[in-house]
Image (cartoon, grey):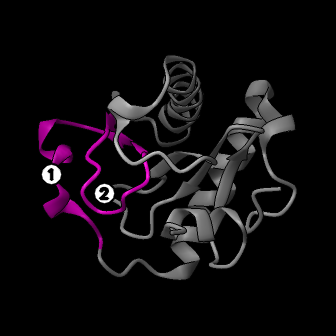
Amino acid sequence: MSTLFSKIIAGEIPGRFVWADEEVVGFLSIGPIRPGHTLVVPRDEVDHWIDADDALLARLSAVAKRIGAAQQEEWDSPRIGTMVAGFEIPHLHVHVWPVWGLDDFGFDKVDPDPSPESLDEAAERLRNRLAAHGHGNHVPADVASAG
């Protein structure tokens, strides 16, 4: 059965993409803890991170690192948080977001109803920063497409 994330990747459901390559995509969370909160997701459906092969985990980590570096510079945060929770959607995903302290690690901090404009702005800022970091070949030409 196709997951919500597979439908987003396929373009059946809209998403604000900031990264796309052959194995992994990155798109903004619709419930961000902080502006720029991105989900790094493998194209293949893998439920639990311990079921992923080592090469895929390494790729997810590498992409999360690149997105995190762009987030840190763009939002001037002292740290970047990552988390693999896996309870929301049965499709492996790494949360990556700017953090200012340990209290930024709670899902109770999620903005349940961010404005479309704020999400569009965060996506554009992050896409521009990723391109400036030399990753333009992985930044989708269309923010709503995983390519």
Q: Residue at (35%, 55%) from the top-left corner?
A: 34
Q: Say which of 56 and 32 sits in front.
A: 56
- Where's residue 26, x and y in %? 60, 48
| Whether residue 132 is situated above or below residue 41 in the rendered picture | above
- Amino acid at circle 1: Gly
- Amino acid at circle 2: Ile
* Res 142 → quadrant: bottom right
| Whether residue 26 is situated above or below residue 99 in the rendered picture | below
Residue 80 makes an appearance in the image:
no
Q: Residue at (44%, 70%) from the top-left corner?
A: 30
Number of the label disc, if any, that sits on residue 137 = none
Q: Residue at (15%, 51%) from the top-left corner?
A: 106
- Where's residue 66, x and y in %? 59, 27
* Res 19 → quadrant: top right
Q: Does residue 37 appear left or right of residue 103 in this picture?
A: right
Q: Say which of 46 and 75 sits in front.
A: 46
First in sequence: mark 1 or mark 2? 2
Q: Does residue 124 appear left or right of residue 131 in this picture?
A: left
10 is within the stretch colored magenta: no
Stretch of the chain drawn in magenta:
82-111
| Whether residue 30 is situated above or below residue 131 in the rendered picture | below
Number of the label disc, if any, that sits on residue 106 = 1
Q: Does residue 106 appear left or right of residue 38 in this picture?
A: left
97 is within the stretch colored magenta: yes
Number of the label disc, if any, that sits on residue 33 = 2
Q: CA distance from mark 1 to mark 2?
A: 8 Å
